[in-house]
């Protein structure tokens, strides 16, 4: 089973409570505090592009990358009013390859939880190549404590034409939350069932800081006061040295 394949057409309707605007506010707060110029941004692991379009509407020039063709198709199909339409690229995070540098890179909603720590070090290395000196990397992860708290839980989300059922199990040996997801979608009088498996790795803040510093980032700060901070979402801000 693949990840974000069957889910892609339904992702936005099933995540309507995500506070994209509030997360974008946090980014802009950090840009302002930094005092540098932030005009061209990268949205890494952009998914269906909701954050990409949110930032584009605020006047930023956007490059967005994701490895899922299905999620990128949803992002490309959106028609939003903005000054410059985003450029969407089908690239895995560890194979990021841009035409030049960006002023900042962002990654929201657990994007880096999906990447094992050893591969994440490669991702940070690629980002250092394409974030300008003095630019920022801003991303969030779910804390290990939050991921462990989901062990054994079952969740159901239902809409008129889709039913999403997922079961979470924490694999202590792998240090990861594994959840199988079943999607039941209406097809006329019948329902079609498709499945996916998702794996989110529990990255300790200390390990992330070590990997960032090894890749050439500094000035690393952790914020627990951002959107969904009370639900285990930790925001990390780092400067490209």
Image (spheres, grey):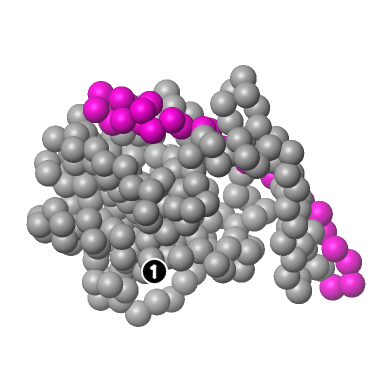
Left or right of 66: which side holds 35?
left
Residue displayed at 63% across by 50% down: 5
Above or below — where is 102 with respect to 50? above
Q: Residue 180: give x, y in percent of width and height.
A: 72, 42
Across and down, in percent, residue 66 comes to 44, 48
In percent of width and height, residue 176 lies at 58, 31
Q: Secondary structure at mark 1?
A: helix
Assign the N terminus to one quadrant of the image.
Answer: top right
When asked about the image quadrant of residue 97, the answer is top left
| Disc 1 target residue | 21
Q: Residue at x 25, y 24 (%)?
A: 214
Q: Residues within 10 Å of mark 1 (few under 14, many from 20)?
A: some
Q: Which residues are magenta?
A: 188-214
Specify whether residue 89 is in view. Answer: no
When asked about the image quadrant of residue 79, the answer is bottom left
Image position, residue 14 (x, y; %) = 63, 64
């Amino acid at each position: 089973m693949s990840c974000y394949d069957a889910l892609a057409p339904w992702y936005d309707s099933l995540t309507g409570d995500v506070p994209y605007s509030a997360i974008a506010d946090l980014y802009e707060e950090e840009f302002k505090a930094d005092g540098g110029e932030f005009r061209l941004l990268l949205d890494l692991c952009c998914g269906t592009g909701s954050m990409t379009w949110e930032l584009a509407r605020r006047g930023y020039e956007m490059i967005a990358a994701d490895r899922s063709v299905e999620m990128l198709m949803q992002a490309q199909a959106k028609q939003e009013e903005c000054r410059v339409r985003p450029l969407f690229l089908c690239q895995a995070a560890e194979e990021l390859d841009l035409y030049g540098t960006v002023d900042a890179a962002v990654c929201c909603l657990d994007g880096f939880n999906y990447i094992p720590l050893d591969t994440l070090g490669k991702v940070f290395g690629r980002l250092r190549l394409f974030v300008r000196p003095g630019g920022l990397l801003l991303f969030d992860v779910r804390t290990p404590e939050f991921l462990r708290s989901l062990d054994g839980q079952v969740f159901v989300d239902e809409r008129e034409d889709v039913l999403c059922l997922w079961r979470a199990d924490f694999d202590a040996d792998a240090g990861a939350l594994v959840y199988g997801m079943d999607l039941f979608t209406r097809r006329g009088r019948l329902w079609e069932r498709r499945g996916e498996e998702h794996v989110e790795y529990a990255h300790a803040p200390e390990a992330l800081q070590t990997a960032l510093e090894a890749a050439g980032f500094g000035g690393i700060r952790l914020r627990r006061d951002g959107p969904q901070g009370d639900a285990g979402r930790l925001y990390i801000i780092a400067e490209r040295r």
